[in-house]
Image (cartoon, helix red, strand yellow):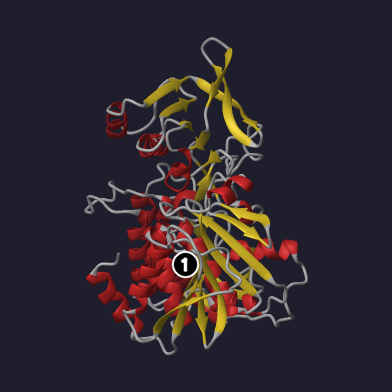
Amino acid sequence: MLSPQIIKSITSYSEKMNRPVTLVLQKGEHEKQAQLEQFLVQISQASELIQFELRSNTHLRSPISFFLEVDQEPTGIEFSGIPSGHEFNSLILAILQAGGYELKLDQSIQERIRRIQTPLHFEVFISLNCHNCPEVVQILNQFALLNPLIRSEMIDGGLFQSTIQERNIQGVPAVYLNGKAFLSGQVNAAQILEQLQDLFPDMLAASTQVEYKLQDVVVLGGGPAGASAAIYAARKGLEVTLIAERIGGQVKDTMTIENLISIPKTTGTELAGALQNHISAYPITVLEHVRVVEIEQGHLKVLTLSSGELIRCKTLIIATGAKWRELGVPGEQEYKGKGVAYCPHCDGPFFKDKPVAVIGGGNSGLEAALDLAHIAQSVIVLEYGDQLKADHVLIEQAKQKPNIQYLTSVQTQEILAQEGQVHALRYLDRNTNEVNIAEFAGVFVQIGLIPNSRFVQGCVDLTAQGEVIINDRCETSAQGIYACGDVTTVPYKQIIIAMGEGAKAGLAAFEYILAQQNSFES
């Protein structure tokens, strides 16, 4: 099942392990068990530090479930199914981290996880085609390695259809906690911790508040704008900290990028990795999986993080980007993950050979329609305006797909469901004022972005749409606070524009610090 090149790579990576890891497979009867056993045996043969064992009477879900063990003790990491495809990296990373590799989570996040005093069993339902699922699986695997009270189980929905149907799951990743629905869609470690603390206010043991040393520049956001701002500021010799829920930001949700000048074609994952590598080339302090919850203004700014830590800085650059805009119609919130979706790459496979709708005729909508056309029975794009707004090249590509159709001048009014699952959509024909109902198994919302600026309300001036108002030097209404990228009033939300704006913000912050140097030193 595994090529010699993959085995060679596992052998190379395992050289840095400092303790053996055992892959323990549940013994029993299942049509896929022989395939899974062969898969695990091949991995174990790549290194003396990776062992395989077939064992009876385990606590596991089925004969196609296995767990990772270190020193005859379960690590809390479990897999139900064959973690191939996107999840292969999750398995290899789990083996390496259980074997002594450094964890990827920020130290402040690790400290909070270790303080958890409540037993937690996470079940992560995934699709092997989902490019967002591995991030959630890998985060929760690290939770398990950090705290013996935590278990994390990856479950391949394709092999556990009865469980999928029993729990009425129609979107991935779907995370269950202690047997109950917990979170769905793409989430990061900070969001998981915040949700946990809402459920279990007393789950953390006591801790002391940490304060970092004074920084010249703090950048909020790890997307193209934030990365660019941090790199430009660091190149000027400034003390720089970058705070982000995830490096790459919304770029990580993009499958194909063909308009980043000088790079004909790349993917969001590749670009996010390149941003990470470029940031790592400079002495930039990166605090990932955390966010700022409070900003105290003044000549020096004091930031309170979701981890409880404090950071003082001379300048602040807001580069928190934007998130998908929601429809705001009845049925949308109620049926998220049950037919209402926002990521065609993650949730498209759930609608194989079924009719789906895409709301939005811009670039995002047409890209989603093109992706879904390979899976769904039919795709209908609904656009509020009187014509599609996507780039000409995307419209032409979509015209070549016989199962993609369009409705323009229509307004979505309600998403309808039967027995807890989406089955239709009510929309208004804006030309005739006629209300129609069309049957769909899934509705993919692709209607643009909303800026991530709520946390700076009252701190800097915003437009009615929530964009941070800036001038041509990325200055906001507050002295020493700058903003760049999709969170701002700059038109055309494009990666290359965000990078340029980030560079401007970093340089502007540098000039401000130079001009104010005497006052900072006094």
Residue at image point 70% right, 72% down: 119
Instruction: Decide if residue 28 is in sight here.
Output: yes
Image x and y of residue 311, in percent: 59, 75
Q: Quadrant of residue 327?
A: top right
- In the current view of this chain or complex, which residue is farthest to the top? 432
Observer-nearest of 296 and 77: 77
Residue at image point 52% right, 35% down: 442
Image x and y of residue 339, in percent: 56, 38
Image x and y of residue 209, in percent: 68, 80
289 to 425, vertically: above or below: below
- Look at the image and tell me in which quarter the N terminus lies: bottom left
Query: Mark 1, residues whose alpha carbon is within 10 Å: few (<14), some, or many (≥20)?
Result: some
Q: Secondary structure at mark 1?
A: helix
266 to 380, vertically: above or below: below
153 to 74, vertically: above or below: above
Image x and y of residue 179, in percent: 68, 59
In the rendered picture of this protein, how many numbered marks are placed on residues? Answer: 1
- Look at the image and tell me in which quarter the C terminus lies: bottom right
Residue at image point 28% right, 51% down: 260
Which amino acid, by three-letter code, is at mark 1?
A: Tyr
Residue 324 as seen in the image, left or right of residue 38: right
Observer-nearest of 513 and 193: 193
- In the current view of this chain or complex, which residue is farthest to the front? 29
Instruction: Decide if residue 220 is in sight here.
Output: no
Observer-nearest of 420 and 281: 420
The residue identified by callout 1 is 512
